[in-house]
Amino acid sequence: QINTAALLDSACVFRWVRQQAPGPQMNTDRQSTSRDLTQDVLLYKDGKLTVKQQVNSLDSESPILLFQYQLSGQLSWNMQTVLSGHSLFVGLPNGELLQGTKEGLTAVLEFAEEKLQINHVFVWFMKNRPDKLLLTRTFCYLGFELVKQDHLIASIAGDLRLMVYTIQQTHTSEE
């Protein structure tokens, strides 16, 4: 069950993020892209996954996190996301997902669960994508579920298919 308060807190961020056209970008030659204009702060690096935060968003209530997953020596998968409250927002661009995307998304989910201490990861993509059924099945396999149309955030989504991954926080206590 999705917490309605979390959705209300995230609704404004979702409107903003949806207009930014975030999503994976491929960088094969290590030359800067338009998203490289700001300085980034390294938050985490382990194996193939690197996570940075944009410097201009350090004091923001909704920081922009940049995930980079190394697919091979010269090929990396890059994802821009927004962290708001206890939710991470991820947008997928139009076009075919590249090989390694599922592995990269799994690494992002593991990082979100273990390091960010969040409750939800939202992912969205255009409803008119030719591969929308494949994407829906893939994300369901990863543990995502479709956000029901009666939730506030679904009404904001409009032409986007919105899915959510709920992270079950486990609390340990010493007896």
Image (cartoon, rainbow, N blue to C red):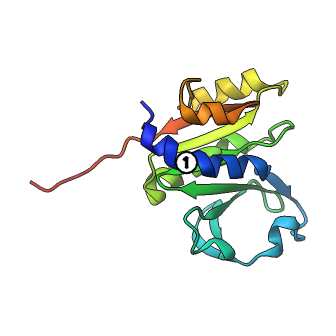
Q: Which residue is mark 1?
A: 10
Tell me: 118 left or right of 53.
left
> Does the image show residue 107?
no
Q: For the point 68% across and 35% down, which residue is it? A: 157
Residue 69 x, y percent position in the rendering = 69, 56
- Which quarter of the picture shows residue 96? top right
Q: For the point 91% across and 65% down, which residue is it? A: 29
Residue 1 x, y percent position in the rendering = 42, 30
Q: Nearer the viewer, residue 135 or 29?
A: 135
Tell me: 35 left or right of 164.
right
Q: Nearer the viewer, residue 12 or 128?
A: 12
Q: Indicate whether 131 appears above or below 44.
A: above
- Which quarter of the picture shows residue 68? bottom right
Point out the residue furthest to the left here.
175
- Judged from the image, the secondary structure of the residue bearing numbered disc 1 is helix
> Does the image show residue 108?
yes
Residue 72 x, y percent position in the rendering = 78, 56
Tell me: 74 left or right of 66.
right
Q: Indicate whether 98 appears above or below 59.
A: above
